[in-house]
Image (tube, rainbow, N blue to C red):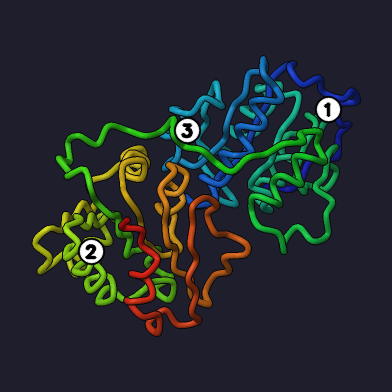
């Protein structure tokens, strides 16, 4: 990042709930983006008549534009450290936005740096952790809080008192093109390629798929194109199973979640979409992540083992609600 400009004055007046232009910053991973939709709804409710812009990462722009919370969606180009021209373009765009307040829901060193990038001179009111912010999230325990609790606490310190869990019902796309039966269970056996320790073994998912099919319920396996090997290993040999790897948009995953009887998956972004669609789910955690900090909130059962290979299929199957 270029050298920090000289410190400027903050906007002196408190911002009325319904005035001016607002910027929300949320970059992050898919699960983090989904969890920020509860705070985004609270920001929209508080600033009913404001013009609200979201600065986000390219993969989330499409679903963000569908939301009722933002008037504009900007894509963060994430300039490289020494790409001065790109940093200047970003600085010009941020300053030209003439924002009265910024809600930094990313609260990273990068997003905090954008506060300083907007100087010198008067800057907008800022909710976040940037040095010099007008509304700092000054809770020393913030890093030990669940994402939703941390963001609710941050917004409370900025004058927004009520934040609900994310509800993505507005994002549910029509899933008719998949021609699925009315009774199906979603299985999400994938996850980040560099975090294989967060995955329940595909052989266990395959066994679970067989148990589900034996109940006359269709296992529907989803994942990205790079997870097709895992989804094939789960669906292979299960006559009722459907493998939709690489075929679903984010909005269609929400639609699948809204229609599914149940879902089982690893600690991965699509599970946040599915739960936010209202689907009951079992989410599997290893020692690689802490559900107390990140789990989706809703109709969720969490099963955790330090090594997920030791989690028995029968124990996971027992959490499914088949009525």
Quarter-wise, where is residue 249 in the image? top left
Residue 62 percent across, percent down from the top left: 40, 33
Check the picture and name the quadrant holding the C terminus.
Answer: bottom left
Q: Nearer the viewer, residue 23 or 179?
A: 179
Is residue 1 visible from the viewing direction of this image? no
For the residues labelled 2 and 3, the Cα–Cα distance comes to 34 Å
Disc 1: which residue = 122
Instruction: From the viewer's perspective, tell me whether residue 88 is left or right of residue 134.
Output: left
Quarter-wise, where is residue 118 in the image? top right
Disc 2: which residue = 212
Which mark sits nearer the N-terminus, 2 or 3? Answer: 3
Disc 3: which residue = 64
At mark 3, the secondary structure is helix
Instruction: From the viewer's perspective, tell me whether residue 162 is left or right of residue 270.
Output: right
Which mark sits nearer the N-terminus, 1 or 3? Answer: 3
For the residues labelled 1 and 2, the Cα–Cα distance comes to 60 Å
Residue 224 percent across, percent down from the top left: 29, 54
At mark 1, the secondary structure is loop
Residue 126 percent across, percent down from the top left: 78, 36
Which mark sits nearer the N-terminus, 1 or 2? Answer: 1
Label 1 with label 2: CB-CB less than 8 Å: no
Instruction: From the viewer's perspective, tell me whether residue 204 is left or right of residue 88.
Output: left
Q: Nearer the viewer, residue 147 or 126?
A: 147
Query: Which residue is pictured at 65% across the width and 30% down the height?
Result: 23
Quarter-wise, where is residue 251 in the image? top left
Badge 2 density bin: few <14, some 14–19, many ≥20, Cα 10 Å: many
- Residue 300 is labelled as none
Label 1 with label 3: CB-CB less than 8 Å: no
For the residues labelled 1 and 3, the Cα–Cα distance comes to 29 Å
Badge 1 density bin: few <14, some 14–19, many ≥20, Cα 10 Å: some
1 or 2: mark nearer the eye: 2
Badge 3 density bin: few <14, some 14–19, many ≥20, Cα 10 Å: many
């Amino acid at each position: 990042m270029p050298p920090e400009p000289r410190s400027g004055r903050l906007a002196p007046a408190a911002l009325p709930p319904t005035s001016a232009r607002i910027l929300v910053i949320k970059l992050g991973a898919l699960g983090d983006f989904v969890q920020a939709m509860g705070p985004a709804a609270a920001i929209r409710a508080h600033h009913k008549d404001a013009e609200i812009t979201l600065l986000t990462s390219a993969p989330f722009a499409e679903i963000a534009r569908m939301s009722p919370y933002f008037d504009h969606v900007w894509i963060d180009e994430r300039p490289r450290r020494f790409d001065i021209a790109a940093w200047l373009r970003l600085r010009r765009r941020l300053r030209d936005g003439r924002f009265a307040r910024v809600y930094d829901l990313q609260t990273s060193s990068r997003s905090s740096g954008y506060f300083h990038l907007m100087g010198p001179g008067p800057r907008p009111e800022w909710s976040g952790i940037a040095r010099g912010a007008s509304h700092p999230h000054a809770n020393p325990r913030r890093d030990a809080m669940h994402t939703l609790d941390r963001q609710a606490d941050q917004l409370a310190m900025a004058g927004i008192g009520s934040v609900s869990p994310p509800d993505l019902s507005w994002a549910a796309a029509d899933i008719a093109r998949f021609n699925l039966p009315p009774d199906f269970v979603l299985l999400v056996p994938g996850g980040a390629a560099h975090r294989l320790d967060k995955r329940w073994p595909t052989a266990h998912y395959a066994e679970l798929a067989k148990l589900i099919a034996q109940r006359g319920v269709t296992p529907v396996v989803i994942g990205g194109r790079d997870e097709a090997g895992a989804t094939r290993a789960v669906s292979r040999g299960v006559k009722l199973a459907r493998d939709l790897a690489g075929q679903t948009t984010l909005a269609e995953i929400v639609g699948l979640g809204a229609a599914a009887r149940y879902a089982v998956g690893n600690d991965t972004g699509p599970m946040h979409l599915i739960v936010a669609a209202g689907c009951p789910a079992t989410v599997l955690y290893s020692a690689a992540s802490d559900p107390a900090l990140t789990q989706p909130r809703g109709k969720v059962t969490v099963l955790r083992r330090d090594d997920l290979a030791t989690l028995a299929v029968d124990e996971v199957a027992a959490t499914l609600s088949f009525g």
